[in-house]
Image (cartoon, rainbow, N blue to C red):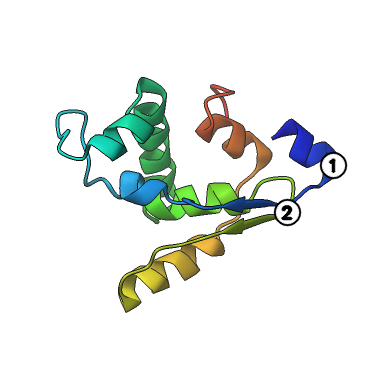
């Protein structure tokens, strides 16, 4: 991220919402999708999910919207590929794309700070 910020080099986020990890459908105990477990199941990511839920509750939005906002609010140009499968999901993504996050919130969500 530091290089992208310094160079203002764009980042295309292929899995901007972590293949649904931030929807709340997954738990550490549900391990039926080996690929998701391999890629996303880590203590750090479970903490990121909890923080996204907390911030979402405070803002009146969902954790998945916070996840999309996280990608789009980086201090360098970003583009997020979304996988909306319904009109409702597309509306959710549109709403998430409009959320503004501070640098402190970005750092808190990324576990590089305990304060926001």
Q: Position of residue 43 (x, y in %)?
A: 35, 21
Q: Residue at x 22, y 41 (%)?
A: 26
Relative to 6, 23 lies left or right? left
Is the residue marked by circle 2 packed among few (<14), some (14-19), or many (20+) residues within 10 Å? some
Q: Quadrant of residue 78?
A: bottom right
Relative to 65, 114 lies left or right? right
Q: Residue at x 34, y 68 (%)?
A: 89
Disc 1 is placed on an element classified as helix
- Residue 77 disc label: 2
Q: Position of residue 93 (x, y in %)?
A: 45, 65
- Residue 22 disc label: none
Relative to 30, 71 lies left or right? right
Q: Position of residue 7 (x, y in %)?
A: 84, 42
- Residue 7 disc label: 1
In this view, the residue in front, 18 or 111, is 18
Is residue 39 placed above or below 61 in the rendered structure?
above
Is residue 96 placed above or below 10 in the rendered structure?
below
Q: Quadrant of the C terminus?
A: top right
Q: How far is the residue under mark 2 from the one under mark 1?
A: 10 Å
Q: Position of residue 92 (x, y in %)?
A: 40, 66
In this view, the residue in front, 115 or 73, is 73
Q: Quadrant of residue 108?
A: top right
Is the residue marked by circle 1 packed among few (<14), some (14-19), or many (20+) residues within 10 Å? few
């Amino acid at each position: 991220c530091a290089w992208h910020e310094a160079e203002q080099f764009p980042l295309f986020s292929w899995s901007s919402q972590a293949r649904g990890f931030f929807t709340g459908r997954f738990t550490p105990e549900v391990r039926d999708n080996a690929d998701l477990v391999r890629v996303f199941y880590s203590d750090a990511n479970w903490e990121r999910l909890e923080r996204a839920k907390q911030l979402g509750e405070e803002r009146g939005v969902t954790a998945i919207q916070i996840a999309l906002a996280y990608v789009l609010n980086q201090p360098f140009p970003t583009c997020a590929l979304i996988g909306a499968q319904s009109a409702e999901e597309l509306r959710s993504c549109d709403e998430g794309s409009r959320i503004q996050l501070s640098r402190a919130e970005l750092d808190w969500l990324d576990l590089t700070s305990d304060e926001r």
